[in-house]
Amino acid sequence: MTLLPITLYGDAILKKKAKKVHKVDDKLMTLIKNMFDTMHNANGMGLAANQVGSDKSVFIVDISSVKGHEKEKPRVFLNPVIVEESEEKIPFEEGCLSIPELRAEVVRPKGIKLIYQDLDLKERELTDDELLARVIQHEYDHLNGVFFVERIETDELKKLKKSLKKIQDRKIDIDYPVAPKAK
Ligand code: ZN
């Protein structure tokens, strides 16, 4: 098992737009395997490549630990694009491995349609309007350099400023490996 250090709020790579994957080689397969180890170790449901310091357009999702979703398989998404969003929006409490211990309610479209490529670079389509749709939207945001806390009300965000600064300065106890503070 290889645990990669997770980048935290404030790290430059988390504000960058991910780069398209053109080939699936051993290096990428190792990255994805290590991402699963890292995510499972930290009890996460999703992880984007820039959360472990890679600029590739890749995220993984595994919601099988959640009641009612036990049969869900771990999923890998390459070069994802959300092509449709439902008009209906719903609030849901989110957390993030790059923003430890902080949770906030985020309003997002309930359902989405996603186009992505699988590990054979074959184009796939996924439609969902439950938990999977929520996790995908959160991870998709990461690949575009967006944090869930940037989608909450300004007043709410203000209340979180102190906690976010602490995370940025590593003044918190985290029970999984994290990347050193960016200079
Ligand atoms: Zn996140």
Image (spheres, rainbow, N blue to C red):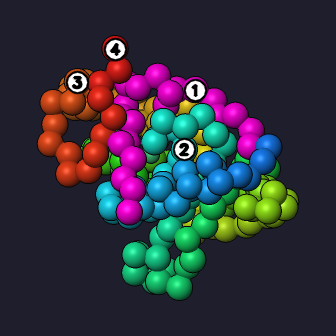
Which residue corresponds to mark 4? 183
Determine if residue 131 is in view.
Answer: no
Q: Are the residues tagged 4 and 3 within 8 Å (C-beta)? A: no
* Residue 56 appears left or right of 68: right
Residue 9, magenta (yes or no): yes
Q: Are marks 2 and 4 in contact (CB under 8 Å)?
A: no
Q: Quadrant of the C terminus?
A: top left
Residue found at the very far top of the displayed protein: 183
Q: Earlier in the sequence, mark 2 or mark 4?
A: 2
Q: Judge depth for marks 1 and 4 and give the one in front.
A: 4
Crowd around label 4: few <14 · some 14–19 · many ≥20 (10 Å): few
**Residues packed near mark 1 inside 10 Å, few (<14), some (14 to 19) or many (20 plus):** some
Kind of residue at badge 4: Lys
Report how far apart the C-alphas of labels 2 and 3 lie in the structure: 22 Å
Numbered disc in front, either 4 or 3: 4
Horizontal and vertical percent for residue 91? Answer: 47, 54
Sequence order check, earlier mark of 1 and 4: 1
Q: CA distance from mark 4 to mark 3?
A: 11 Å
Residue bearing mark 1: 16
Image vertical order of residue 144 relative to residue 30, above or below: above
Q: Is mark 1 within 8 Å of ligand 1?
A: no
The residue at which mark 2 appears reads as 49
Residue 169 - label: 3
